[in-house]
Amino acid sequence: MLQNKKRNIYKSIIQSMVMDVAIMYSGGKDSTYAIEYCQNKGWNIKYLISIKPNRRDCYLYHFATVELTQELSKILGYKQFYLPCTVADPEKEAQIVKEVVEKNKVDALVLGGIGLQETQLKSLQKTLLPLKVEVFASHAGEDHEIIFRDMINKGYEIMISQVAGDGLVNWLGKTITKENFEDLKKDSIKYGFHLLFEGGFADSIVLSAPIFGNKKIILDEIEKVVEDKYCGHIIVKKLHIIEQPTIPYIRNNRFS
């Protein structure tokens, strides 16, 4: 309890500062939400870092659909470092990020999520400590259900791009909506996976969000690769970008 209180106080102090930040960006819901969070804080987002592993056993980074961030970063209008990862070792994986940050100074590196991806968070904190760069999850300690509902209410179009857990294969390639959110919640209780997929249960790709302006990615052709009853991912073979009307958003954490 005391440790959590100290962590929240520290987070409050750090996040009240005006900072130059970099954001770990996979194209998924949490990193997209982190970009929005940093914008709302008034921080200077200097660049995005997107790491594309060439292997499934990578510890720190998403595997599926990360290549789409090259299009998404253009839509967002931010500089991006898009780099490969060929190793499966947390310390070596974190060094990829350190090499970028050493040459492109920032005050903080922001991760998406609520801070339960401990291997990623602790590995990057340890690696960037000598550079005096703060590393934290944008929504650490917050309620995961409220966050997920807020994303959907805002118009985030979230597709499940990779799964690795019991009860999730049927969600692969599906978009989470107001209509099916309760089904996802029931499955998370039934099968024991985290509702925000923290801990590596699933990854996602955001195809539309308020911070994309009037742009939206349409997936014309995808392939579902299902390895077994627990694991699978999608491969995007063809896509295009459209313009759509901008929908105003009124904050409301409950579905109407």
Image: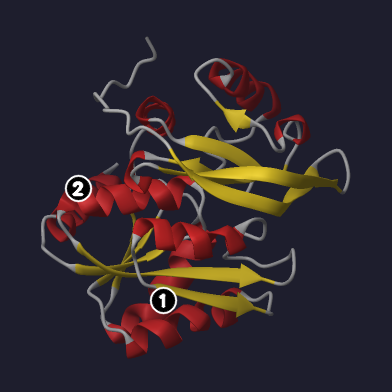
Left or right: 40 in relation to 53: left
Secondary structure beneath label 2 = helix
Q: Amino acid at mark 1?
A: Lys
Find out whether the residues at labels 2 and 1 contact each other: C-beta distance under 8 Å.
no
> Which class describes the residues within 10 Å of circle 2: few (<14), some (14-19), or many (20+)?
few
Residue at (61, 23) in percent of width and height: 184
Rendered location of residue 55, percent (x, y): 74, 69
The one of 256 and 67 positioned closer to us in this rendering: 67
Q: Quadrant of residue 248?
A: top left
Rendered location of residue 206, percent (x, y): 51, 44
Q: Amino acid at mark 2?
A: Asn
The one of 15 and 28 positioned closer to us in this rendering: 28
Rendered location of residue 140, percent (x, y): 34, 47
Q: Which residue is mark 2?
A: 40
Q: Which mark is residue 76?
A: none
Quadrant into which the C terminus falls: top left
Left or right: 69 in relation to 236: left
Q: Specify whether residue 140 is in view.
A: no
Quadrant into which the N terminus falls: top left
Q: Specify whether residue 108 is in view.
A: yes
Q: Which residue is mark 1?
A: 126
> Which class describes the residues within 10 Å of circle 1: few (<14), some (14-19), or many (20+)?
some
Q: Relative to 169, does residue 103 appear above or below in the rendering?
A: below
Q: Quadrant of residue 67?
A: bottom right
Upstream in sequence: badge 2 or badge 1: 2
Residue at (41, 84) in percent of width and height: 100
In this view, the mark in front (2 or 1): 2
Secondary structure beneath label 1 = helix
Question: Distance from label 2 to label 1 (Cα)?
Answer: 27 Å
